[in-house]
Image: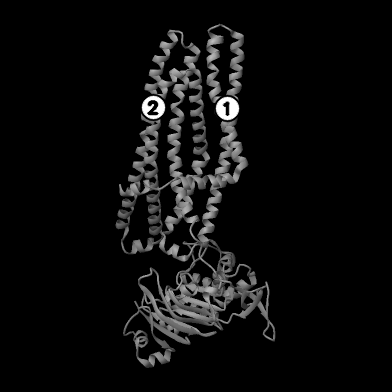
Amino acid sequence: MEKNKTIKSENIWPTIKKIFRDVLDYKVLLIVTLLCVVISTFTQIQAVAMVQPIIDDYILQSDLQGLTSAIIKLSLIYLISFLTSLIYVRVMVRISEHVTEDLRNRLFKKIQKLPVSYFDKTNHGEIMSRFTNDVDLVDQALGNSLTNMFQSIMLFIGIVVMMIYMNFKLFLVTFAFLIGMMIFTKFIIGRSARYYGTQQKRLGNLNGFIEEMLQGQKVVKVFNYEDKAVERYENNNNDLRKAGKKATVNAGLLMPVLNNLSNIDYAATCIVGAIMAIYGNLSIGTLAVFLTYCRQIQRPIGMVAQQSNVILQAVAGAKRVYEVIEMEDEDDLGNVELVRCRVDEDSNITECREHTGRWAWKKKENGNVEYKPLCGNIEFKNVNFSYDGKDMILKDISFHAKEGQKIAFVGSTGAGKTTITNLITRFYDIDSGEILIDGINIYDIKKSSLRSAFGMVLQDTSVFTETIKDNIRYGRLDATDEEIEVASKIANAKSFIDRLPEGFDTIIKAGESSLSEGQLQLVSIARAAVAEPAMLILDEATSSIDSKTELLVTDAMDNLMMGRTTLVIAHRLSTIRNSDVIMVMDNGRIIERGNHDGLISKGGRYYELYTGKIELD
């Protein structure tokens, strides 16, 4: 119950206003919809009102000619009602599809602009639930429920006005029951808002768990985790069932109560109306129309309540979507850009559009433009960092990687090796200290430019459901087919690609590729090679492949590293023997540094790791 109390205090109106703001982007279609709803509702009310003269003036007076004319008019009114209903339903569906398309587009664009820390902290299944379930609820509500809600409100108001106009005294009987209906409806809607909010959160949790289990299916099977996985799934599913049951049972109370109140109201109105008709205070036609209205007035109340449940579900879903859309973009106050350039014999730098393999830092200040060649000098000065603001991951880290050097980091899991690469690319920001690239503070460099300066090959190979050629082209979108082939040669990937039935046009499917881990890693190296970056980050790129394939991948990485400043995070020490500097990390500090021979001669931690006296964990 505590969760429900929390949800109860949330205000749904800001979310509703946001939805309407998006709907108002399609004003013309919305005006057409509302106009058709008004006409359809008016014709429905008017058609019932025409029954009174048909009974009193034509049937009771045996006026066959007048009855025929009235029936023709009634048929035309119903035809107009049908046509306008058809129009507003079709138009509103168009509006809902446009709005939900816009929502998904905005959500996806926002996802691209959020910091990496958001994805580290948020379950991917939870994110996907916002794209699918939550947006679909908005689509359903706009496509059907919104117009039904509006029409029901208008129908209710119109019927009440007609009943007051026809006989105010008889209306007072219905009015007493209407008060009870509306109070009960408001109570049910209030409870539904809480329960549907909980239901959407539980659904997101369940989707997140399913996504985790599917991604880790091999681990689940290897460690015989199936029974425990089923148990946890059943617990999550049971939580969703309980939330859904509360929401459904609560909503299900509405119509039975309203129907019974409506039946009692109808019976009471019949008795009072019949007495008034007997004493001549009410015509038979008026009583017939009034009783029809009395029966109909329950329908818009019930419809409002039912559609409110759907709309409340949509609001709960929309709230989760807008929460992401309204998140702060990844901050970027840098004013230094990375541009392509040409360098003449006198070392003059000229910015250009075409790819030359040369890059420069471009800084605009006071109307002046200054260019500085990208060399690849990386410097850490007394850097401290923690992910949560409490536990320090890096402690007073200082080092200098000169142009073209290969710097390797080794150490146990959790020593802070990968964190260093996350800080260089500003996936996270440091707590204190400085990180400089070619003497420029990375905070002064635009993040897109900073990241473009690096090529990255990670332990986990990321491929997309596209051709091998397009997967390599992710490194540089304007790369030609010839440049892609050259990059694949550098990465030692061309030979196995040529052996594939469709060569570079072979489709790779993310998550179910027929290529081996080693082949996928070679594709990743080719992706980095085609970008021709000045600097490289290699994060345990050989840790998940066999020793035979390692030789091929290592040779490919050596080709890629030639002449480039490279930071290597290594698990296999054999791959970093030729590094210019090896830094041994422990508990967030650099405890040893030097080349391979120098560190071996010291007989310290690196020596113990290399000789197997202690092992990396």
Q: Looking at the picture, does residue 254 appear above or below residue 232?
A: above
Residue 486 placement (x, y as % from top left): 61, 75
Q: How many marks?
A: 2
Q: Quadrant of residue 497?
A: bottom right
Q: Which residue is mark 2?
A: 259
Q: Residue drawn 42% across and 91% down?
A: 597
How many neighbours does mark 2 have within 10 angstroms: few (below 14), some (14-19), or many (20 or more)? some
| Quadrant (top left/top right/bottom left/bottom right) for the C terminus | bottom left
Q: Is residue 566 visible?
A: yes
Q: Position of residue 242 (x, y in %)?
A: 32, 45
The residue lying toward the viewer, choosing from 191 and 415, is 191
Image coordinates for residue 598, horizontal then vertical, percent: 41, 92
The CA span between labels 2 and 1 is: 26 Å
Q: Is residue 525 visible?
A: no
- Residue drawn at point x = 37 percent, y = 35 percent: 252
Q: Secondary structure at mark 2?
A: helix
Q: Please say if 41 is above or below 596.
A: above
Q: Which mark is residue 338?
A: none
Instruction: Say whether residue 376 is left or right of residue 609.
Output: right
Q: Mark 1 highlights which residue?
A: 81
Q: 10 Å neighbourhood of mark 1: few (<14), some, or many (≥20)?
A: many
Q: Secondary structure at mark 1?
A: helix
Q: Earlier in the sequence, mark 2 or mark 1?
A: 1
Label 2 is placed on what type of residue? Answer: Asn
Vertical side of 129 occupied by 435: above or below:
below
In the image, 506 versus 269, the foreground residue is 269
Residue beneath the point at 39% across and 31% down: 255
| Residue type at tag 1 | Ser
Of the pair 59 and 542, the residue shown nearer to us: 59
User: How far across and how far down the image is residue 32, in percent?
Assistant: 61, 37
In the orientation shown, which residue stands out farthest toward the top? 62
